[in-house]
Amino acid sequence: MYVAVKGGERAISAAHAWLDETRRGDPAVPELTVAQIEQQMGLAVDRVMAEGSCHDRFLAALAIKQAKGDLIEAAFLLRAYRTTLPRFGASEPLETTAMRLRRRISATYKDLPGGQVLGPTFDYTHRLLDFALAAEGSECPAAPEAASPVADVPRVTELLAREGLMQREATSEAEPGDLTRQPLTFPAERPVRLQNLARGDEGFLLALGYSTQRGYGNAHPFVGEIRVGHIAVEFTPPELGFPIELGEIGITECQMVNQFKGSRTEPAQFTRGYGLVFGHGERRAMSMALVDRGLRARELDEDITAPAQDEEFVLYHSDNIEATGFVEHLKLPHYVDFQSELENLRTIRRTAEQARQEAAE
Amino acid sequence: MTITVVPPAPSTLEGYNFAYLDEATKRMIRRALLKAVAIPGHQIPFGAREMPLPYGWGTGGIQVTASILGPTDTLKVIDQGADDTTNAISIRRFFTRVAGVATTEHTAEATVVQTRHRIPERTLREDQIIVYQVPQPEPLFRLEPRRMETKRLHALADYGLMHVRLYEDIARLGHIAKAYDYPVMVNRRYLMSPSPIPAFDNPKMHRMPALQLFGAGREKRIYAIPPYTEVRSLDFEDHPFRPIRAPHACALCGSRDTYLDEVITDDAGGRLFVCSDTDFCAERQADSAKEAAE
């Protein structure tokens, strides 16, 4: 006689022990340290910080180690940790013209104040597997250094705005909404949309951004500017009344310049798509800027025809922690519902069969 | 005005508050719960937190349970009606770990029952609370995916879309083909998703003595049905609501009026049916064993 499956508790413990064992892999191979991941898998760390919505390189590296390199799982670990942390308040706004730059490029001007700084980039590398890297222990010679770029690096979009060619953003002193505290509601304000995109899944943003370039959404983007580097975060404790520096974070900012035909109230001018993400994440920042511009369709009175312009579609599906949870919950038992569906289907087929027989008689 | 500060109960997991959530978050959720109880069946948005369990695996129910749980509560967690399904075990372990509360597999002993996909067969009492895990709180989502639009439809109590959908089933198939997550009207006002319980369980919601709370973590919504509230499954006069169950008796306890799971026993069409509510089934088996012994 069949007895309901018991022993789930033991099975779970055993499965987790096995997971630990496979994480370690062959014990003959030296164990990865968190510091190695943090230093040598830096872009993975950056992605996990961005999607985990928490700037902490050590914790992100630890999460990557614990998640066996599954970056969405790592971002999930980081998010679950960050929700338990107390919140002291909001920092002062970041002034990205004051960034300590490692990279700054513009695609709209050949040369400009502050210059073009390539920085550490994959761009223009030939994607040939470097078998020399397979041999460990080889010394990496230090990169040649030039004099650091001039201190003042104005924003490209600001240069355009001064000429009246770039739409100015509305300024606001209001504290922006926070998705980690309040649920998403629609229509969503731009700061909330940007927060959602900044921690959205890179693949999802990439595909959506790409779709705007292929005619799904009327985008004509230029990279006004990408800047990558470090910036100080300041916080004003109420008891002090003046800002103090908390430390530096790595960020990537992208400002896309987009055409805008103008409307009844506004003359033709350029409009901005904005991307800002933790760490070095150009693909993410650029995709974010494309999607941000797409989502401005409503406010700019453009026709909403494409997925990337559809606020609910984009913002409800961008979060890979939510998405992975719900997709993967299909692994959980559903046999109660399935049983109901089975009985239902049997009844429908019986009814149809009876009708067929009656018709034949 | 005096404010009484209640010190948080000690947690069993170092570094975490009792029942995992911090007290401010619990208060936010309790406020949403109070509002939900005041407007039966109406979805209340709340600032769902990221939990250490995945979205879609009961985070809404877990947050509701964490917010109402006290140190003296006794918790029962079921998935598919059973206490020993892996996710039920995982959630029960979570609360044992972060709240240290007593747990039970017996419906009668529990003060809080967290469930996925079932309502226990044993009638719940006034001093019990049932917490449902809800994947999709919006009953209209298959008909209208946009929340801006469904919000408007709820405000106007415009549920024609759902009636048409049910009518189309009748026109095509001869009867309503919704087998689970069968929509209900709560207090004659709001259309509500009962969560994906089988339609068989819907009548248990009607005038239930226990408080019913619903948590959807990923969708960040809470709703509730206060005790003894009218809950009607949508139907038509000439096509009344019809709960579905497999027309068999439980192979273990012989019950003919409980919801059954179908179990495949071989690859030659062999199958048997057993109660989905494992606690209820075990009690019935124990009762009949006792009767036989007497």
Image: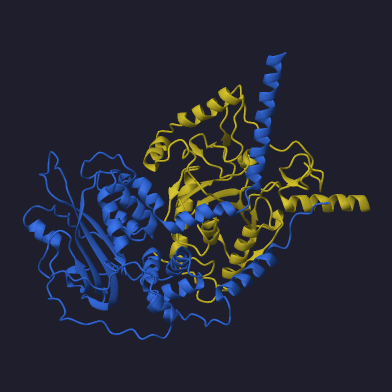
Chain colours: A blue, B yellow
Against A245, residue B20 (above or below) is above
Locate residue A361 relative to residue A111 in the image: left or right: right
Give the total number of marks visible in the rendering: 0
Q: Position of residue B10 (x, y in %)?
A: 55, 73
Q: Residue at x 72, y 56 (%)?
A: B106
Residue A95 showing in the rendered view:
no
Residue A193 place in picture, x, y as percent: 31, 54
Q: Quadrant of the N terminus of chain B?
A: bottom left
**Residue extending farthest right:** B294
Between A16 and B188, the one lying in front of the other is: A16
Classify residue B117 as left or right of residue A166. right
Position above or below: B114 against B205: below
Q: Position of residue B289 (x, y in %)?
A: 88, 52
Q: Which residue is at the front of the view, A200 or B57? A: A200
Specify whether residue B149 is in view: yes
Q: Position of residue A128 (x, y in %)?
A: 36, 68
Instruction: Please tell me in which quadrant of the rendered image residue B66 appears.
Output: bottom right
- Identified at 36% across, 41% down, the residue is B148
- B126 sits left or right of A192 in the view: right
Which residue appears farthest toward the top when viewing the image? A361
